[in-house]
Image (spheres, rainbow, N blue to C red):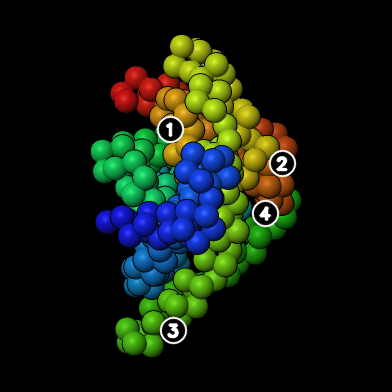
Amino acid sequence: MFDWIQKLADWIVFDLLHLIKGNHLAEALNFFIYDAVKIVLLLFVVIFFMGIVNSYFPIEKVRNYLSRNKLFGLEYLMASLFGVVTPFCSCSSIPLFIGFVRGGIPLGVTFAFLITSPLVNEVAIGLFVGLFGLKITLIYVISGVLLGVISGLILSRFKLERFLTPWVKDVLANAEREEKVFEAEKTPFKKRLPIIWNEVVKILKGIIIYVLVGIAIGGIMHGYIPEGFFEQYMSKDNFFAVPLATILAVPMYSNASGILPVVQVLVSKGIPLGTAIAFMMGVVGLSLPEAMLLKKVMTFKLIGIFFGVVTLCIIISGYLFNIIL
């Protein structure tokens, strides 16, 4: 499917720029061009398609349904699945997190969404299929959804509402006095397209820099880091490789589409897939920028509990991935 992109990358690097095959710069640049074109195309197609889907399933309807129905635990799964179809990074999910809390949705259910949304979304799924195949993608999606559900259930047991900031409590108090009426707009498909297109452009503008930076890092690693470099730190024989990868990922920040090229290179360099995915989950789900934004709605204690539970679940997922795959 992507052979033409590889031919384009080869032509630019070896014919147009006259770089020598096997040269570090040539290999890094070839990787960058190939992955940049492929991933940007995938991003465009997937985001546009999901823009059409999301235009018919607005966030307000989902939020309203979850807040008004007792689902006997299924609300955690529904919130997690809703996170799958929202193309947001961890920081972009914060406004929705606030909206969920304001809509009266239990905090544990809201956490299920907040955890799953950056980890597994339609963009990441589309890229995962292209990079790793359908089988690994299915396992990743299932584990990401379960991670959100289980983490949400655990966090709900702690009764953490008391650790929300006064700002959120004021918002909740005001929301209780307000009566909201949700009316679906029956807009023809043709009139939706300009709105969908603008949203596609907006999302692409918001994530393209992270995508290109991620691909650039992957290209540098692919071209310059020798075989066997990572094995000594994150090999399958190192029992602490998974927690080490997860913890080292926290200072970094990217979305799933931006970090996937790096994961691809890590795997090609010999790091077990579970360890590499734990690193990816740590980057997109436990970033410092996310913690700074969450400070608006959570106390430091709540942020610490949230990060601690998610970190533990990511580490367990990494070990399970290594066993399964």
Residue at 72%, 55% (x, y): give it.
167
Q: Residues within 10 Å of mark 1 (few under 14, many from 20)?
A: few
Q: Nearer the viewer, mark 3 or mark 2?
A: 3
Mark 3 touches mark 1? (CB < 8 Å): no
Report the residue marked by disc 3.
194
Disc 4/disc 3 C-alpha distance (Å): 34 Å
Which element carries disc 2, helix, strand or loop? loop
Residue at 31%, 55% (x, y): give it.
3
Q: Quadrant of residue 273?
A: top left
Q: Earlier in the sequence, mark 1 or mark 4?
A: 4
Q: Nearer the viewer, mark 4 or mark 3?
A: 3
Amino acid under label 2?
Thr
With respect to residue 20, does 42 lie above or below? below
With respect to residue 12, does 197 lie above or below? below
Which element carries disc 3, helix, strand or loop? helix
Mark 2 touches mark 1? (CB < 8 Å): no
Query: From where the camera sits, is residue 42 visible?
Result: yes
Disc 2/disc 1 C-alpha distance (Å): 40 Å
Q: Nearer the viewer, residue 218 or 134?
A: 218
Q: Earlier in the sequence, mark 2 or mark 1?
A: 1
Report the residue marked by disc 1.
268
Disc 1/disc 4 C-alpha distance (Å): 45 Å
